[in-house]
Amino acid sequence: GAVVSQHPSRVICKSGTSVKIECRSLDFQATTMFWYRQFPKQSLMLMATSNEGSKATYEQGVEKDKFLINHASLTLSTLTVTSAHPEDSSFYICSARDLLMGQGLYEQYFGPGTRLTVT
Amino acid sequence: AQSVTQLDSQVPVFEEAPVELRCNYSSSVSVYLFWYVQYPNQGLQLLLKYLSGSTLVKGINGFEAEFNKSQTSFHLRKPSVHISDTAEYFCAVSGPNTGGFKTIFGAGTRLFVKA
C-alpha cells in the first residue's frame, strides 16, 4: 500500500530557531502533498497544498513566510517553521496524493505526524 | 462551501456493545466521503471510503458506513466494539466543491470503550 513517512516524529526547539519537517512518499510518486496542523483534541486544519515543482498554495490565515513549504521532488516535501514561537507548538501531519493512481484524485495517504514543541 | 458536521464530540460505550458515530455533510453534489481513525500521537488511518456504487461501505476492523444522499449523512457503525477501538474518529469529504478535491475534516468524535 501507499506509505508516507515523516521525520522527525518529535522535535523540541528553542523559541526563535527554525525547524524542518520532512514528508516522504515511500512507494509512490506524490504529485500533490498537503500539510495539516492539529491542536490537542481538535481536528486537522489544512495549512497548504503543494504540487511538485511549483509554489505551495496556502490557506487563508496561514503565514507563508513563517511556514515555508518546498516540494522539490515527487517523493519529498518539507515544511520549515521559521523563527518558531511557543504558539507554533502543535502536531503537524502531511499527506500525499498520486494523481496517477487509480483513485488518486480522491484519496490521500497520511504520514504519522510530527510533534513540535517550542520552548 | 462544503462542510462536515460530526454531531457527537464524545461517545462512551461498553465493550461488545454496538456503536454509531454520526456524520453529516453540507452538499450531496459529487461528494466523496471518508472515515479515518487516529490513535494518540499517530497519524490518520483510513477506515473506509465512499466514492460511488453501493451505499453500504465496509471497512477495516469491522466498521461499516452507509451513504444516505437524501439525509446527507455518512454514519459509521460497528456491531460490537472492543477496548482497542478507543480512538478519535474523523469524518471527511472531498469533491469538486472542496476547492480542488481538498479533504475537509469534521471536528472528530472521541470513541471511548469501557470494560
Image (cartoon, rainbow, N blue to C red):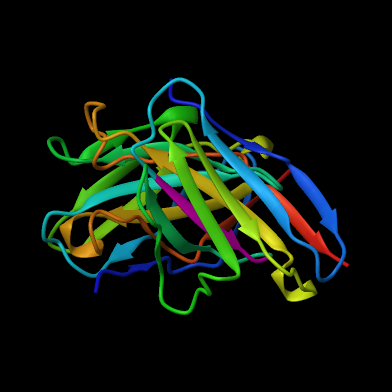
Magenta part of the chain:
A33-39
Residue A100: image location, x then y, percent: 24, 28
| Apparent side of residue B54 relative to residue B24 in the rendered image (left or right) | left
| Apparent side of residue B10 relative to residue B64 in the rendered image (left or right) | right
Residue A27: image location, x then y, percent: 45, 20
**Which residue appears at 42% of the width and 40% of the height?**
A96
Residue A53: image location, x then y, percent: 36, 44
| The quadrant where residue B54 appears | top left
Q: Pick whichever, B74 or B44, lies toward us.
A: B44
Q: Quadrant of the N terminus of chain A?
A: top left
* Residue A101, above or below B76: above
* Residue B84, above or below A2: below
Q: Main secondary structure of the magenta part?
A: strand
Residue A36 located within the stretch drawn in magenta: yes
**Which residue appears at 18% of the width and 41% of the height?**
B55
Q: Pick whichever, B100 or B5, lies toward us.
A: B100
